[in-house]
Amino acid sequence: MADRFISVSLDKRGVSCTAKLLDDRAPVTCDAVWNALPPAGDVYHAKYARNEIHTLLPAFAAAEPPLENPTVTPIPGDLCHFAFTGTRLGTASYGYEDDAGHRGRKTVADLALFYERNNLLTNGDAGWVPGIVRGAVVEGLDRMADACQDLWRAEALGETLAFRRA
């Protein structure tokens, strides 16, 4: 199979990076994401995982991918996939709005980009939260990391995180 690449962008800030899908390590997840492109949604900055931005979308795979290529310590440039039930995101402390797409749905897809070091996927309510590493940024991570830091300091309201075929 030929390498597949996607663009990850913060649309309002006009910044993007390019990532290679890790088809050899997470084939089921990569196919599900590739076939669902171009998903986009409101961006959130992680509260617990640290240097992560993500969006929540309605589940798009016919069946949730198995936990392939898992990690609880993502590194800069990792693209991860998580699946959460609505009840796991229903606590007000998570800070998601009602329209974030998690309430009343059986499963929500969380598509994430990790932009800096020292991440640990744990949650006070649930414990360890392993993610599926489905891609690695190969170009533009420095500029994207700067935009992510700006998003952390200046707010995420009105910003969209989008994934497209590159």
Image (cartoon, rainbow, N blue to C red):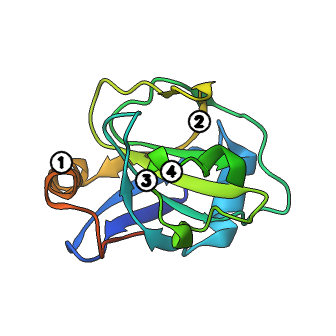
What is the secondary structure assignment of the residue under circle 3?
loop
Q: Nearer the viewer, residue 156 or 91?
A: 91
Q: Where does label 4 land, which residue?
A: 92
Which label sits in the foreground, 3 or 1?
3
Position of 98 compared to 28: left or right?
left
Can you see residue 137? yes
Q: Where does label 2 land, which residue?
A: 131
Q: Where does label 1 land, which residue?
A: 142
- N-terminal-most mark, 4 or 2: 4
Residue drawn at (59%, 36%) of the image: 131
Distance of mark 3 from mark 1, alpha carbons? 27 Å
Q: Residue 90: give x, y in percent of width and height.
A: 61, 51
Q: Amino acid at mark 3?
A: Gly
Distance of mark 4 from mark 2, alpha carbons? 22 Å
- N-terminal-most mark, 4 or 1: 4
Residue drawn at (23%, 53%) of the image: 148
Is the C-beta separation of discs 4 and 3 under 8 Å?
yes
